[in-house]
Structure formats: C-alpha cells, structure tokens
Image (spheres, rainbow, N blue to C red):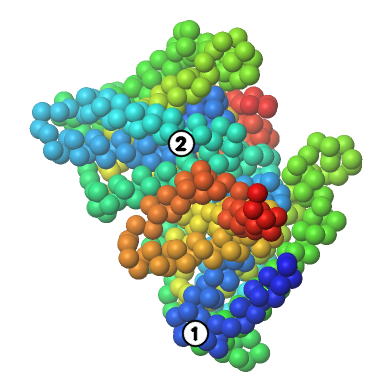
Amino acid sequence: MKWLGAALLGGSLLLPPFLAGDFYINLASQILIAAIFALSLNLLVGFGGMTSLGHASYLGVAAYVSALLTSRYGLGHGSAALISISGTVAMAAFFGVIALRATGLGFLMITLALSQVLWGLAYRMSNVTNGDNGITGLTRPAPFGISLDNPVAFYWFVLVVTVIAFAMMMVFVSSVFGSSLKGVRDQSRRMAALGFNPWLIRWITFVYAGFWGAIAGLLYVYYHKYIHPSSLSTTSSAEALLGVIAGGSGTLGGPAVGAALVLLLKNYASAYIERWNMLLGLVFLFIVLVMPAGIVPGFSKLMAGLRRGPR
Amino acid sequence: MQFWIIQGLNSLSLGGLLFLLSSGFSLIFGLMRLANLTHGAFFMLGTYFAAIALRSFDGLNLWVVAIGAGIIVAVLGGLFERLVLTRLKANPLGQVLVTLGMSFIIADACLMIWGGDSIPVPTPQDLQAPTRLFGFVFPTYRLVLVGLAIVVAIALYYLLERTRLGAMIRAGVDDRQMARAVGIPVSNLFTIVFCLGAGIAGAAGALGGPILSAYPGLDADMLPLALIVVILGGIGSLLGAFVGSFVIGFIYTFGTALFPELAYIILFLPMIVVIAFRPQGLFGRVGA
C-alpha cells in the first residue's frame, strides 16, 4: 500500500512536462522548491523538536549571495553556488551556536530575532542589496551546457535536486544519527545520561537543515531570476512552517505535501484577493485549532479507520 | 555635543517605548509561558487608533486617546485569549503559532482598512514647544515619554510586589500547579495578565505615535526590538525588560545615527554576547 502510493507519487512527478503547459510546469517547479525548503525545516521542527521561526534566513541569504556574486561580481554560477552554499552553512553553524543556547520558546524567539535582523539588513543596506527594489536581471545556470531557461528543462533540474534532497534527508533521519536525534527530541536528559551529547546532535541537525535551506534558496533565486527582502521575512519563514505543520511535522513526506498546499493556496488565492497575509493567518488558526496533527497524519488515520471497516 | 545629547534623549525615549512594549511581553511570557508574537501588532493597533481618532475628532487629546487605545486593545487581547488561546492550553507550540497567525491577520487588516501610506500622529499642542535645560533644547514630548515609562515601571513594580493580585501572579509564575492547589484562579490570572500586557502595548503604540507615526510594517519593526530586549534582559523579568529596553534604545538610536546601514548588525551584538555568557538573560532565572 505504502509502495503503491510512493510509485503513484513518483509517476505523477514525471508527468507534468508531458501533459501540462508552461504555467503548470512552472508551478510544479515552485512546489518542488517549496517542498525541499519545508523538508529541511522539518528536520528541525519534526525530528529535532526545535521550532524555528527563522528558516527563511538560509533560503534568503543563499539566494542573495548567489544573486550578488553572479550579477555584480561577474562570477560563474558554479563558483557562486559553492560560495553561497558554504557561506550559508557557515552562517547556520554560527546561528546554531547562538540559538541552541536555548530550547523551546527561547530557541524560537532567538531564531525569529536573528532572521528579522537579516531581513532589516536586506532592506536597509540598499547599496549592497538594492533595498526594496530587490536584485533583478539574474540568470539561470547552465549545468553541462544545458540551458535551464525553458520551463521543462528547469523542471527536470529541480526534480533531480529534489529527489537527491529527499533521499539524503530520508537517509539522515533513518540513520543511527536520526534515531539519536529523535531520542534527544523526546528525552534529552536520558540521552545525555546514556552518553550522547544532545547539544552536538541538535547543532549538527541545525547546520544540515541550513544546508538544505541554502539549496532551496539557490533554486528559488534561479527560478525567479529576482530576489527581494521579502524572501527573508517572517511571512516566508511562517509559510514554510505552516507547510510543515499542515503536512504533519515529523513525518517524512508530509511537509512536502503541506508545502505544496500552501503554495497552491497562495497562487490561487492571490489570483482573486490581495490579502494573502490575512489568509495565511487564518489558515494558521484553522490548522492549529482543527488539525493540530496535520493533514497527512489526519488522512492516514482516516484511511486506517476505513480499512478496519465501519464500526 | 548637541548631537550626543539629543541622540541620548532620543535613545531614552525609544527605550521608554520599548519598555512599555516589552514589559507586557515579558509579563505574559513569565506567567503563561507564551511567546506572544501578536505583541507588535497590538502596538501597531494602538498607533493606528491614535492616528485615526486624532484625525477624525477635534477635541480629543493624545492622553485620552492613549487610554482609549489601551482599553480597546486590552479588550481585543482578552477576547483572543479567552476564545483561542485557552483552547490550546496543552499545546505551547500551537499557542505561539496562533499568535503569529493573529499578527498576520491584524497587520493585513490594518493595511486593508487604513492603506499603505503612513499616517502621522500629532504631538500634543502644549508639548510642542521645546524645553530648555542646561542650555540645551529638548523636544518636550520625548522627555514626557521617558517620564511616563518610568511611572509605568514603578506602577507595574508596585502591582507585582505590593498587591494581592501581584502576589497571586508571582505565585503563578513560580509554580502554576501549586498556585492552583491553594485556590488561586490561575486561568483568570492568565486573562488579566494578557489584557494588561496587550493594553500596555496598545497605549504604548498610541504614545509612540508622535515619534513613529502609523505605517504598515510598524509591527514587524517593533516586535524584533521587543524580542531582543527580553532575550537580553531575561524573559519574564520586569527589571530585565527595563534595563534591556534602555540598552537597546541607546544601541539602536546611536547605531542608526552613526552607522545607518549597520544598525541592525549592531543590535545583534549585545544579544549574542549576553546569550553566550548568560543564556537566561541578564536578569532571568535559570529554568524560568
């Protein structure tokens, strides 16, 4: 049953380039990017029990660094990507040291404060970041000489990265290290008594999540060919967190589904109304009050109930 | 010299505003273990109420409007606490997310109703003339604001340390279950404290109006400052909020005046230093 579902999902990911028009292929690319981002946040929220409200920092900083290096300093995409990823990971390592001095709500507040500081910087340092105008006129890379400018090529590129990302995060979570991470989430003191170092386990996870956040950021800036301070905003972090929670934090695929739903909602809603932030807030209230475990676990529970037959 | 003195006063008045904002945040966090991310939005609501009320009605003065804004925001906060937050008692993460969602709703509603342009809040007429002190000229309103923040600080201290209600709140902060067991209605205290915190934030927003004016994004500007203040001062500590507010007020004002582009990085530094050496904050208690 589980494998059937996975096969169906995998099959449907291969379909868009053959069936759909450019609009839907682009939408599918955006969904995959949002899914990588939500999955990386889920490493922290779901498996590590560390609710971060500043995950947009990694997406935004990686995107800004790549954008600046390629547009202003004329670097090639390969070296720009390398510098941007290593820089973002270094930042995650540093932020991790600060934020992990606290746990729970303290951690949440510190991550939020740090990301707001970056957001403010992106707005105010306008001679570097171009402030509210954002950085325009960016290009997409051409790996192995294949141009990614057409939507289909870009979709295949994002799909390959997504599959690698999903596989690597799955390996991370189901490894021995992943088990110790879950142990630290549930029983930090007992894990410490068993000789594990909870702080180090959390910190490694934090950095790893930052790495995949950076990858999502690169894809994000490649897709849009444009970057604006709003990519660093609390709204951006909150959208990802909503995806994680709506999809079911701590499940493997749930956050990807949640992120897809949030993105679709955002796209369709903004076609009709301008009030995306209000809708986002209302959805937050709805999910937390009505479906606290998320949509995917809620759905599996429903399926399990159906399989057992009517009572 | 004039520059340093004027900026010093600006720092003090921003510090006063930050204290009004963060004391409520800290109070709520201390008792309810709730990081109220709506706090910046409450502040902004207060500013908008003041701007609109003063624009629409001639005879009003800012003090009345500030009290009115405080009461309205307190009532809104109380409703939010009663109708939404109490349902999530066992789910602290859910509570934070709901306050975040609420802040988006309020911010977007303000944008929808009052538009994207900033609306000025006039300085009260009798305070428009500058004050001369030791040969220097000070904007009177800012001096009054600092005084007000100190008055509120003393009133809050008195409330918490010298009244029956304060004793009950302190008991709830120290040991919620024990407080319940001896008959203190902790749930009602939650509502009272939440209303109080929201009300102070709303009144602070109105009072900050003449300096900041009402504009969309004011909430997102103020909330991180409040967060940094309470992380610095120690979450749940009134003294910490007081000291932290003025420290951040100084750093932010001088940072913006001297290195306008780096003000945000300079804000970060004290927070990092304090967290590195005292993760619970300057005046926070371990385990609080």
Q: B11 or A223, which lies in front? A: A223
Are tags 1 and 2 found on a single chain?
no
- Asked if one can make out residue A192 in the rendered structure from this viewpoint, the answer is yes
Q: B22 or A170, which lies in front? A: A170
Within-10-Å neighbours for mark 1: few <14, some 14–19, many 20+: few
Relative vertical location of residue B158 with respect to residue A268 in this rendering, above or below: above
Relative vertical location of residue B166 with respect to residue A54 in this rendering, above or below: above
Residue placed at 61% from the left, 64% from the top?
Answer: A256
Q: Is residue B199 left or right of residue A237?
A: left
Which residue sits furthest left? B58
Give x and y (percent) for residue A50: 66, 46
Residue placed at 63% from the left, 86% from the top?
Answer: A143
Q: Is residue B138 left or right of residue B22?
A: left
Q: Amino acid at mark 1?
A: Ala
What is the spatial separation of the Cα atoms under label 1 and label 2, in whole angstroms? 42 Å
- Asked if one can make out residue A69 in the rendered structure from this viewpoint, the answer is no
Residue beneath disc 2: B84
Q: Amino acid at mark 2?
A: Val
Give x and y (percent) for residue A94: 67, 52
Question: Which type of secondary structure does the marked residue at label 2 adopt?
Answer: loop
> Pointers 1 and 2 in contact (CB under 8 A)?
no
Q: Quadrant of residue A155?
A: bottom right
The chain carrying label 1 is A
Give x and y (percent) for residue A133: 38, 67
Within-10-Å neighbours for mark 2: few <14, some 14–19, many 20+: some
Relative vertical location of residue A122 with respect to residue A49 in this rendering, above or below: below
Which residue sits furthest bottom? A145
Q: Is residue A170 left or right of residue B168?
A: right
Residue placed at 10% from the left, 28% from the top?
Answer: B59
Q: Which mark is residue A20?
A: 1
